[in-house]
Amino acid sequence: MRVEILRTRAEIRKRVRSLRRVGESIGLVPTMGALHEGHASLVRRSVRDNRHTIVTIFVNPLQFGPSEDLAAYPRQLEADARIVEGAGAGILFAPSPPEVYPEGDATFVTVEGLTRGLCGQCRPSHFRGVTTVVAKLLLLASPDRAYFGQKDAQQARVIRRMVLDLGFDAEIVVLPTVREPDGLALSSRNRYLSPEERTRALALSRALAAARACFASGERRAKALLEQARRSLSETPGVELDYLELVDDETLEPIDTVSSAALLAVAARVGPARLIDNVVLGASRVVAAEE
Ligand code: PAF
């Protein structure tokens, strides 16, 4: 099977209409490309759940701040198309910016509350960019299900809220973070790291694991759990912390004690890369990725 590459809104609309006419289910996997095994796991899951899977690749300018890595963000459509095909999806939508943001565009989607903390503090316009583009992709692809990774936990919660509030008829499926054997969460931005920086970056998953072990031994006080993670992080020099927070997994509000599912989330700069990672303490709503 060759993956079919569509470039324009007109093309994707026509293709989706033809699938819908015969009542076939559609899964959507929105990405910014530079695909890795984490994306492949989303695609494989969608292929399993739906008759057709549309993967989108669009480096969305609206979700990058002025001093962020929009220009440097890796673009590799041919290699990505092979990964999409290998994971079993048949349709790849790779629009140019004007197809997504027509000249003079003035319509944006903003989710309040959930976007205030965590990454929203350091990247004030980021989630407005994410929800605007995801809303457009949901409208174009009209999927039954859309797939996101737990690594971007806040993004997944914000998208769920938007889908509920705007009444999109799509189920949002969130799949577990895929990690390297040594614990590093897969990210397109890992490729910015030198071998030495990559070793330093392991401090993030190690800190989360330290707090999780503390939670497993019965600790429920946020202060003690955060202290455990902070101490672990401080053992590695050259990891510049943006935030380390323990929040309610649904509201993303800081908590004092873990009584229901809680999200321990970290963001830090290591060399040229800003990396994020998280772990859920207590019962999680993330779907198990049995493939
Ligand atoms: O997670 C990402 O890659 C992006 O934020 C997304 C959801 C594709 C929107 O551009």
Image (cartoon, helix red, strand yellow):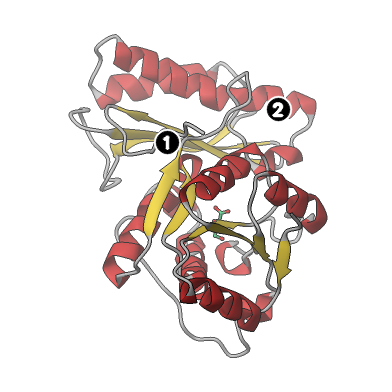
Ligand 1 visible in quadrant = bottom right
Crowding near the residue tagged with mark 1, few <14, some 14–19, many ≥20 C-alpha atoms within 10 Å: many
> How far apart in space, not on screen, are marks 1 and 2 (Cα)?
19 Å
Residue position for label 1: 265
| Amino acid of disc 2 | Arg
Amino acid type at circle 1 is Ala
Q: Is residue 273 above or below residue 209?
A: below
Indicate left or right for 9 with 248 as reference. Answer: right
Under tag 1, what secondary structure?
A: strand
Residue 261: percent from left, percent from top: 26, 33
x, y (%) of residue 18?
55, 76
Q: Residue at x 46, y 61 (%)?
A: 25
Image quadrant of residue 237? top right
Against 233, residue 16 (above or below) is below
- Asked whether 266 or 217 is in front, the reply is 217
Q: Is residue 261 left or right of residue 88?
A: left
